[in-house]
Amino acid sequence: MAGYFIAFISAVVISFIMTPPARKLAIRVGALDVPKDPRKIHKKPIPYFGGLAIYISIMACMFVYMPHTSTNIHIMAGATIIVLTGIVDDMYDMPAKIKMFMQVIAALVAIKGGVQIHFITNPLSATGMSYLLNWLSYPITLFWLVGITNTINLIDGLDGLASGVASIAATTLLFTAANLGYDFIVMQCAIIAGASLGFLPFNFNPAKIFMGDTGALLLGYMLAVASVLGMIKSVAAVALAVPIFALGLPIFDTTFAIIRRYINKKPIMEADKDHLHHKLMKTGLNQRQTVLIMYFISMMLGIVSIAIADTEPFTGIIVATIVVIAVFYFAKIGGLFSRKEQ
């Protein structure tokens, strides 16, 4: 257990130390978030490249504390592709199709290294019967990796929100993996959580630096990989539900955005100001209060994730179903499916 703690602290320290140089580099090369878009909440230019500090922390700790297996090397290679994509996007605003293409390439690299969902389990089966996906495992894994990679980016709308939620999600996956004895995933999640946390002091309101797409896509990618590795090792009927709730806040918020845009006949990829954090701020809350509430929601969903991973399959499915129904009910009455005219 001491090894995981040392890796976590190392990731915190490296990320914390590397963030100021990353900020200086962003200012020097002009990688700044200039608030021209009315959806932006900040009023003055903020440097990007916080994700570069997170990347250095994660890569250094993975190299030192994790085995140099083919899977690990492929994960690190995929992460590097994601970060290079993010850097270009933060500096030059990369076209969405090209950015998505690069994410697919990174996901394929991870899949080549063995990060792949091979089976699904019948939750209604008393014996926990599983079914091999065969060739379907490739598109299903690809969809999951690319989808989760983007969820952190989609909630990155307030100071400290994405980095804090990513740290909470990684910690949730860590505890779940620890209970099940998945040492590789525990170490990976400890590093992700530490790197996110080390960056947070510079990113919490008022932010001195943003992680940009460089960091948001990286954290999404790493969490996606960790969740798939957990599903690979688990044959439990709730294997899929565990990472869904661990990453609950970004997954649900993204799902609501897709439903909202579909109902209102708007393009799925079109940005709006009707995400949960926008709704909370419209009630009069400031950035810090809104982010803290979002942290609390993420923690509650994380507790659900840990609980259903440590219970009987049928009970876990019932609990997961009840929570999903409750989440959608509160989303509906909170107006997350309606859209205000911009």
Image (spheres, rainbow, N blue to C red):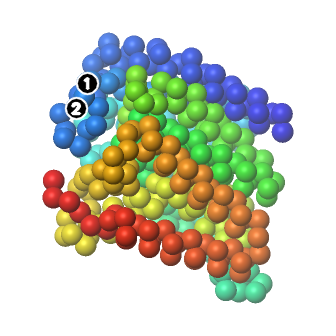
Dot 1 and dot 2 residues touching (CB under 8 Å):
yes
Q: Where residue 331 sits: x, y (%)?
A: 40, 67
Q: Which mark is drawn over residue 35?
A: 2
Q: How crowded is mark 1: few (under 14 residues within 10 Å), some or many (20 or more)?
A: few
Task: Give the residue displayed 68% in from the left and 39% down from the top.
Answer: 190
Task: Give the residue displayed 58% in from the left and 27% down from the top.
Answer: 198
Image check: 237 left or right of 40?
A: right
Q: Would you identify the image quadrant in which residue 322 lies? A: bottom right
Instruction: State the SS at label 1.
Output: loop
- Placement of 211 over or under 244, stated as above or below: above
Q: Would you identify the image quadrant in which residue 237 lies? A: bottom right
Q: Please name whichever residue, 332 or 235, is drawn nearer the observer in this view of the structure.
A: 332
Check the image and name the residue furthest to the front: 284
Q: Residues within 10 Å of mark 2 (few under 14, many from 20)?
A: some
Disc 1 marks which residue?
44
Q: Where residue 121 sits: x, y (%)?
A: 66, 77
Q: Where residue 91 sits: x, y (%)?
A: 28, 28
Task: Give the residue displayed 72% in from the left and 71% down from the top.
Answer: 236
- Placement of 218 over or under 300, stated as above or below: above
State which tag comes first along the sequence, 1 or 2. 2
Check the image and name the residue furthest to the right: 1
Instruction: State the SS at label 2.
Output: loop
